[in-house]
Image: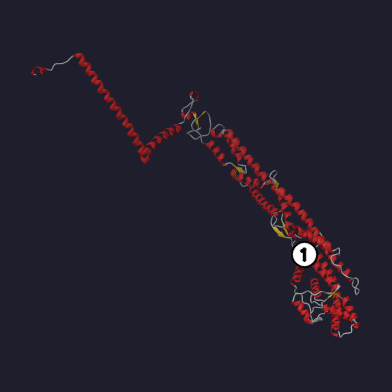
């Protein structure tokens, strides 16, 4: 009897734990206590053992039977839903294959391309169409995360609370089906293999969400801070494909269900992993390209051809535009293209530019460290003009040391130059039409002024060769007049400054006063000396003549 009571008490405890009364379940839920789930085998065993219990357990047995019936009914619905999920995975794979392929993932970020001719960005219409097609997948992932799918909840569980058992959903897409299965499985009181399947699908769908996010914004994989995300996602996907994350019991009602389900999502996951690996390869190529591009753009030893910059700019379209190296390459390519276009216009139109403009243009190309045919043409034109200027200086045309014919040849040669030296041309033209006081060309015997360097015809200034040989230095009338003028103006300016400014006037007066004082003192010294000499002479005279008796001396 004691054993029977103990057995009855144990049965009641197990029954209450599996299917508690409404008040007990509400209390547990109110306290936030998670109910431990029990296996279907435990419920079946309790129903079988009920016949051996001597007490009135009709209510408990009824709840157990309802729980068993409801759970079994849910499992049959779950089997159908899982089959729908298998079919949905097959459709999902086809849909993704229509958008991505192993070869197309490599170009997934190339929706923007750069024309090698004008450097302007354009959208590739094919890739833009794929972006539109992928929007349907994006909407499905967003609906999954928003939990907006409606699930019928018209079957009431044994606890008296509404329990979502039915798996009928309006939308038969993959994410709606999986969401319904996952949420419905969490409402069961019994642990079932289908719940394990739902947990595994939850992780699988979560992986697909991350995978889609990366492939939908594949340019982000080139950001260094996202390198580990891609690597970890591939690693976690390969781990899921080993089917060791979840241990799922066999389902006698449908023995192939688990294997068919795993094969369905594993096929899609395998395709995605392959695409992600392609992104990994692209990322490696991006790093190699960055290293190569940075080396080319940063190099100061060797000039970069514009063709190389344009090629790098076209390649950079496959990579994130926010990358520092991509920005540098695009900026350098744009500047180089603009420079080449401006230089080409100058060359084609035959526009003549000054040496200062040519130097400024070539200096800009040197600063950009670029080279092209236009640069070589302008550089050679600048060198030609510089060489021509050296020849002009050597010919002595400015000093009248070359013949009119030589000057004419130099001017005619200059007329074909792209880069001009108008100052030197002006000097040459002046040399042809202006020497001496007569302003005629250089001709016959000429004599040069050592002051201004101007050359004069001998007859014009009245000097012949014989007279010229006797001169150590010849100064022309203009220089002599200028010198006299400067001397006189300097003297006048000194006088004006002396008597016009207060400081100068004070100084001048002080100097005059000092000079006058010196003269006065000198005069006083001279007077004093004269008096002294006079007295001396008078004394000597009296000594020589003797004392002189006055006429009126007898009157005393």
Q: Is residue 92 left or right of residue 517?
A: right
Percent of width and height locating residue 498:
37, 37
Q: Tell me, what colour scheme is on the image?
A: secondary structure
Task: Between residue 409 and residue 12, name the one nearer to us.
Answer: 12
Percent of width and height locating residue 105:
79, 60
Q: How many marks?
A: 1
Quarter of the image that includes the N terminus: bottom right
Task: Between residue 177 and residue 254, name the one nearer to us.
Answer: 254
Q: Is residue 310 visible?
A: yes
Secondary structure of the residue carrying numbered label 1: helix
Determine the residue located farthest toward the left in the rendered image: 555
Q: Is residue 31 left or right of residue 441?
A: right
Task: Between residue 142 and residue 247, name the one nearer to us.
Answer: 247
Q: Is residue 439 left or right of residue 503?
A: right
Percent of width and height locating residue 277:
81, 58
Which residue: 14% across, 16% down?
Answer: 549
Percent of width and height locating residue 153:
79, 80
Give the answer, above or below, for where 186 lies relative to 292.
below
Quadrant in the rendering for residue 90: bottom right
Determine the residue located farthest toward the front in the rendered image: 2
Task: Between residue 265 and residue 442, name the one nearer to us.
Answer: 265
10 Å crowding of disc 1: few (<14), some (14-19), many (20+): some
Q: Which residue is mark 1?
A: 210
């Amino acid at each position: 009897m004691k054993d029977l009571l103990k057995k009855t008490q144990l049965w009641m405890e197990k029954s209450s734990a599996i299917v508690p009364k409404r008040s007990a379940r509400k209390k547990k839920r109110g306290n936030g206590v998670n109910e431990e789930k029990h296996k279907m085998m435990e419920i079946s065993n309790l129903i079988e053992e009920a016949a051996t219990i001597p007490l009135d357990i009709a209510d408990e047995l009824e709840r157990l039977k309802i729980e068993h019936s409801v759970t079994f009914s849910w499992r049959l619905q779950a089997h159908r839903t899982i089959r729908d999920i298998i079919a949905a995975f097959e459709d999902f794979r086809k849909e993704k294959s229509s958008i991505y392929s192993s070869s197309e993932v490599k170009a997934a970020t190339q929706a923007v391309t750069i024309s090698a001719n004008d450097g302007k960005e354009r959208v590739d219409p094919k890739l833009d169409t794929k972006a539109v097609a992928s929007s349907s997948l994006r909407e499905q992932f967003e609906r999954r995360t928003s939990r907006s799918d409606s699930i019928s909840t018209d079957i009431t569980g044994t606890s008296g609370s509404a329990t979502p058992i039915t798996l009928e959903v309006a939308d038969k897409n993959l994410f709606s089906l999986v969401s319904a299965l996952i949420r419905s499985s969490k409402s069961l009181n019994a642990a079932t293999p289908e719940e394990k399947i739902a947990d595994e699908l939850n992780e699988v769908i979560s992986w697909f969400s991350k995978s889609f996010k990366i492939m939908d914004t594949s340019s982000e994989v080139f950001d260094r801070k996202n390198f580990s995300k891609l690597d970890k996602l591939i690693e976690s996907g390969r781990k899921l494909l080993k089917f060791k994350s979840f241990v799922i019991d066999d389902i006698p009602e449908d023995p192939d269900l688990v294997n068919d389900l795993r094969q369905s999502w594993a096929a899609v996951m395998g395709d995605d992993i392959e695409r992600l690996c392609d992104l990994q390869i692209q990322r490696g190529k991006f790093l190699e390209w960055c290293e190569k591009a940075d080396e080319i753009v940063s190099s100061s030893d060797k000039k970069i051809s514009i063709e190389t910059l344009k090629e790098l700019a076209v390649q950079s379209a496959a990579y994130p535009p926010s990358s520092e190296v991509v920005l540098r390459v695009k900026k350098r390519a744009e500047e180089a293209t603009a420079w080449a276009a401006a230089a080409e216009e100058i060359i084609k139109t035959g526009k003549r530019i000054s040496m200062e403009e040519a130097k400024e243009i070539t200096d800009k190309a040197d600063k950009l460290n670029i080279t092209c045919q236009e640069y070589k043409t302008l550089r050679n034109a600048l060198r030609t003009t510089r060489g021509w200027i050296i020849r002009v200086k050597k010919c002595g045309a400015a000093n009248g040391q070359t013949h009119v014919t030589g000057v004419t040849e130099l001017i005619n040669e200059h007329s074909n130059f792209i880069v001009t030296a108008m100052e030197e041309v002006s000097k040459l033209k002046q040399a042809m039409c202006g020497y001496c006081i007569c302003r005629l060309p250089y001709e016959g015997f000429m004599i040069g002024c050592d002051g201004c360097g101007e050359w004069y015809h001998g007859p014009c200034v009245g000097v012949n060769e014989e007279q010229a040989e006797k001169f150590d230095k010849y100064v022309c009338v203009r220089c002599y007049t200028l010198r006299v003028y400067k001397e006189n103006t300097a003297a006048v300016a000194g006088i004006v400054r002396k008597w016009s400014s207060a400081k100068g006037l004070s100084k001048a007066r002080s100097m005059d006063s000092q000079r006058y004082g010196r003269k006065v003192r000198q005069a006083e010294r001279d007077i004093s000396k004269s008096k002294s000499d006079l007295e001396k002479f008078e004394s000597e005279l009296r000594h020589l003549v003797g004392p002189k008796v006055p006429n009126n001396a007898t009157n005393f």
